Image (cartoon, rainbow, N blue to C red):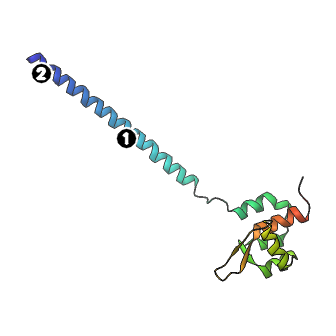
Amino acid sequence: MNREVLDRYREAIVQAAEAEKALIDCRARLAIIEKEIELSGKASDTPPKTMTERFIDDNRDKLEPDDIEFLSEKHRGAKEVVRYSGISESTLRRMVDAEKIEARRTDAGHRRYNTVSVVRYLITERDGPSA
């Protein structure tokens, strides 16, 4: 009977040691995850670039100062696009229908043209496809 009690005691000690080891492993994994989160937070202090910023970076050599000014807003009304591009309003509508440029509609039904798509069209289609 003494032997049986001793064996159960040993088994309990082994189980306690295994549980303690598992707890230490969990704490180590948690510390690693917390550090990764902390480091990724520091890396993302700089917000990702917008589509417009990436477009300007990729096409800076093709853009004039007035292009960059036009791109300062994400969407522009038809009159602003006409004034900037020289394309008539009816042609702009047809270009949207043909999916050459992007536009969205306001709640009042007016078209607001995506400035990046307008400038991209002017660079690629009007000036000829880039090689």
| Residue ID for mark 1 | 27
Estimate the x, y position of residue 94 in percent, counting from the top left. Answer: 82, 72
| In the image: residue 27, left or right of residue 93 | left
Q: Residue at x 46, y 44 (%)?
A: 33
Name the quarter where the N terminus is drawn.
top left
Q: What residue type is labelled 1?
A: Arg
Instruction: Evaluate whether residue 11 shows in this view.
Output: yes
Which secondary structure, mark 1?
Answer: helix
Q: Which residue is drawn at 14% across and 20% down?
A: 6
Q: Residue at x 40, y 39 (%)?
A: 28
Looking at the image, is mark 2 or mark 1 nearer the viewer?
2
Estimate the x, y position of residue 24 in percent, counting from the top left. Answer: 35, 36
Instruction: Evaluate whether residue 73 shows in this view.
Output: no
Q: Is residue 127 above or below residue 1?
A: below
| In the image: residue 28, left or right of residue 9 | right
| In the image: residue 74, left or right of residue 79 | left
Estimate the x, y position of residue 74 in percent, counting from the top left. Answer: 71, 71
Q: What residue type is labelled 2?
A: Val
Q: Which residue lies furthest to the left in this view?
A: 1
Circle 1 residues within 10 Å: few <14, some 14–19, many ≥20? few
Q: Is residue 2 above or below residue 110?
A: above
**In the depicted view, which residue is nearer to us: 112 or 84?**
112
**CB atoms at circles 2 and 1 under 8 Å apart?**
no
Q: Distance between the residues labelled 2 and 1?
A: 33 Å
Q: Which circle marks residue 11 in the picture?
A: none
Q: Residue at x 66, y 79 (%)?
A: 106
Of the residues under marks 2 and 1, which one precedes in the sequence?
Answer: 2
Q: Which circle marks residue 5 in the picture?
A: 2
**In the depicted view, which residue is nearer to us: 23 or 38?**
23
| In the image: residue 74, left or right of residue 28 | right
Estimate the x, y position of residue 62 in percent, counting from the top left. Answer: 86, 62
